[in-house]
């Protein structure tokens, strides 16, 4: 697959002889191709951002305050929800601003910073999902060893590792991409500074950059995904050996919420970053990016609250205490 992608890329390289520009800013085209929907999209994104902040913020709060949720699973969930808030804040406010003002320019430095933060937080989200799968694996497959294995020290190390693991590599990848020369147009056919549309504007030989994208996707997307698949393979094997259907259903119910988030996030992310630069189209990239930048953070609290009895109980207790103070 890589050989075919590379040969296609070489056939579509932009020659160095084209007009090179020393860019100081880019233009994020976003959803400018649907001018009649600008204010509808503006209102929709504001509402989505409100629900993302409210939903994920509530999960962060109740996992910190409710004594019944002081377990590794909810410790990871609280950190994951906080990560979702950070992740969406990198892109969505800028989208709302662009739609409201119709000023779509973004400086070269701001674009690089946005890409770097998005990549770092995206890598962290991949590792968090793998850590949460490992937690479920230990809980279901090794229940007697769970308190010993998932101790506070290990949980803290896993959380810190997930947050910081992608920082050096993603800073390096961003620096490499923004050290390229760019040809003519400074218009990015996207709603944020992502790798595929930026590489589309680059001049000359981008073979190394494409290979770095594949390598980065392999390390920060494919490896966590394979760890999740391995964990759930062990979980399914263990659950099917349980004596009663009730026990099997209960075990699977603790994993279904996490699996739903995994499918939403990894499905769209892997399609985006495992394609060659020449096979990208603006419309497809924007739709796929909406899933892992907006849809997953919005549905994360809904999935976990509607499918999780402990979270619903903690939320009712929290709301009751707040109303009792009024």
Image (spheres, rainbow, N blue to C red):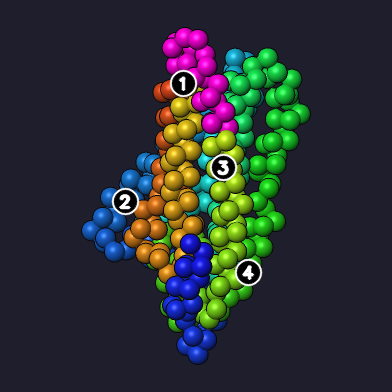
Q: Secondary structure at mark 4?
A: helix
Q: Is residue 100 above or below residue 256?
A: below
User: Marks 1/2: CA distance?
Assistant: 35 Å
Mark 1 or mark 4, whichever is nearer to me: 1
Range of magenta residues: 231-251
Residue 94 seen in render:
no
Near-viewer residue (39 or 211):
211
Could you tell which of marks 2 and 4 lies nearer the N-terminus?
Answer: 2
Could you tell which of marks 1 and 4 lies nearer the N-terminus?
Answer: 4
Could you tell which of marks 1 and 2 lies nearer the N-terminus?
Answer: 2
**Residue that label 2 marks:** 41
Q: Residues within 10 Å of mark 3 (few under 14, many from 20)?
A: few
**Residue that label 3 marks:** 226
Which mark, residue 176?
A: 4
Mostly what secondary structure, the magenta segment?
helix
**Residue 238 highlighted magenta (yes or no):** yes
User: Marks 3/2: CA distance?
Assistant: 36 Å
Q: Secondary structure at mark 3?
A: helix
């Amino acid at each position: 697959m890589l050989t075919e992608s590379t040969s296609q890329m070489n056939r579509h390289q932009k020659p160095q002889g084209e007009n090179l520009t020393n860019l100081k800013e880019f233009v994020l085209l976003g959803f400018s191709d649907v001018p009649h929907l600008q204010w509808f999209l503006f209102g929709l994104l504001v509402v989505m951002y409100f629900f993302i902040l409210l939903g994920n913020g509530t999960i962060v709060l109740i996992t910190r305050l409710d004594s019944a949720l002081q377990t590794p699973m909810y410790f990871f969930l609280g950190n994951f929800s906080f990560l979702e808030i950070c992740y969406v804040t990198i892109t969505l406010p800028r989208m709302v601003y662009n739609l409201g003002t119709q000023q779509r320019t973004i400086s070269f430095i701001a674009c690089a910073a946005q890409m770097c933060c998005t990549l770092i937080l995206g890598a962290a989200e991949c590792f968090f999902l793998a850590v949460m799968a490992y937690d479920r694996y230990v809980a279901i497959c090794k229940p007697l060893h769970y308190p010993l294995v998932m101790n506070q020290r290990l949980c803290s190390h896993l959380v810190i590792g997930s947050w910081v693991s992608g920082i050096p590599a993603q800073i390096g990848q961003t620096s490499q991409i923004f050290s390229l020369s760019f040809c003519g147009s400074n218009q990015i056919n996207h709603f944020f500074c992502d790798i595929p549309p930026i590489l589309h504007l680059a001049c000359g030989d981008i073979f190394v950059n494409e290979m770095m994208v594949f390598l980065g996707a392999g390390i920060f997307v494919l490896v966590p995904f394979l760890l999740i698949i391995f964990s759930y393979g062990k979980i399914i094997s263990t659950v099917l050996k349980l004596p009663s259907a009730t026990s099997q259903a209960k075990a699977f119910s603790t994993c279904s919420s996490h699996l739903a988030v995994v499918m939403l996030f990894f499905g769209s992310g892997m399609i985006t970053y495992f394609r060659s630069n020449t096979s990208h189209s603006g419309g497809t990239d924007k739709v796929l990016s909406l899933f892992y930048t907006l849809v997953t953070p919005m549905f994360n609290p809904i999935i976990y609250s509607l499918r999780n009895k402990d979270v619903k109980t903690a939320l009712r207790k929290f709301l009751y205490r707040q109303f009792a103070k009024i």
